[in-house]
Image (cartoon, rainbow, N blue to C red):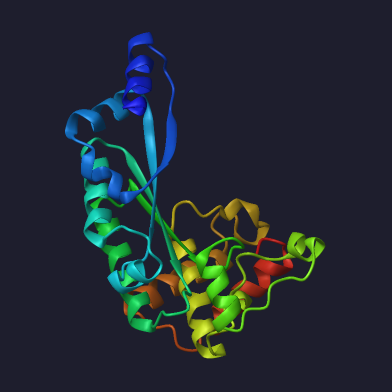
Amino acid sequence: SRVEAICSAIIREGYDIEWTADVRANYFDRYDRGFMETLRKSGCKELIIGAESGSPRILEAIQKDITVDQVRDAVKKSLEQGIEVFGLFMVGFPWENARDVELTMDLIDELTKMDKERVKTTVSIFSPYPGTRLYDSVVKDDGFTPPGSLEAWGEWNFSSIANTPWFDPEYRSFLEAVANIARVKSAKFEWSKNPMFRGKSVVRSFFVTSGKFRWQRRFFKSPVEWTVWTMIQRWRGYA
């Protein structure tokens, strides 16, 4: 393959580099041990996998064309070569329910346990993107009103929970808490961007402790502190 040829050339020429790449989970079906070794030897440090959901029902609904088992296999093959994995997940799809979110959280926990140092994950809120099938669907059937001008699109917050009008306020609060806690749990989270959370601040310790407690117990009812978290992030311009 072209990727293998490029990686082999990097090895042959002796280039000392590190690189990362986005990759679909189903591609690993054809990645054998020799190919994965070539990736590692050429400097592949991390593979970013768009897993999206731990719910087979949701993966089918969004036509992702991958399975949960393929996600597991992709992570396993990467770790066997010492390659780090960054798993991207999403919640807030129109057909979603709390059980689908629980399955996603379960998969995140399962993957993280494979190697807590090398497997990192994050959870985002689904947002309708123009030109996609899901966008057309939520505009037509789920009450989503898109910005009315180019300027409005420029100011639109693609990560806002407000982009999911098909859910009631209680469920949206639940989704926002799940996404925020998942980000805080991730080693990818950049605490240093917000002065309030740098170092070993009391505020930072509070949110880390709260996040671990709620995530482990799957307890997201009345997440007042995470509502405050969102307000802080928006006030500081990070959300």
Asked if residue 195 lies left or right of residue 226, the reply is right
Q: Nearer the viewer, residue 34 or 29?
A: 29
Residue extending farthest left = 33
Note whether residue 79 is visible: no
Determine which quarter of the picture holds residue 236: bottom right
Residue at figure coordinates x 51%, y 55% from the top left: 189
Residue 195 x %, y %: 67, 57
Q: Quadrant of the C terminus?
A: bottom right
Asked if residue 117 lies left or right of residue 199, the reply is left
Residue 185 x %, y %: 43, 62
Residue at figure coordinates x 37%, y 75% from the top left: 101
Residue 209 x %, y %: 44, 70
Determine which quarter of the picture holds residue 68: bottom left
Asked if residue 162 lies left or right of residue 73, the reply is right
Residue at figure coordinates x 63%, y 64% from the top left: 158
* Rendered view: 2 above or below 176: above
* Rendered view: 46 above or below 63: above
Q: Nearer the viewer, residue 61 or 11?
A: 61
Note whether residue 80 is visible: yes
Residue at figure coordinates x 36%, y 15% from the top left: 9
* Rendered view: 74 above or below 4: below
Determine which quarter of the picture holds residue 194: bottom right
Q: Nearer the viewer, residue 167 or 124?
A: 167
Residue extending farthest top = 13
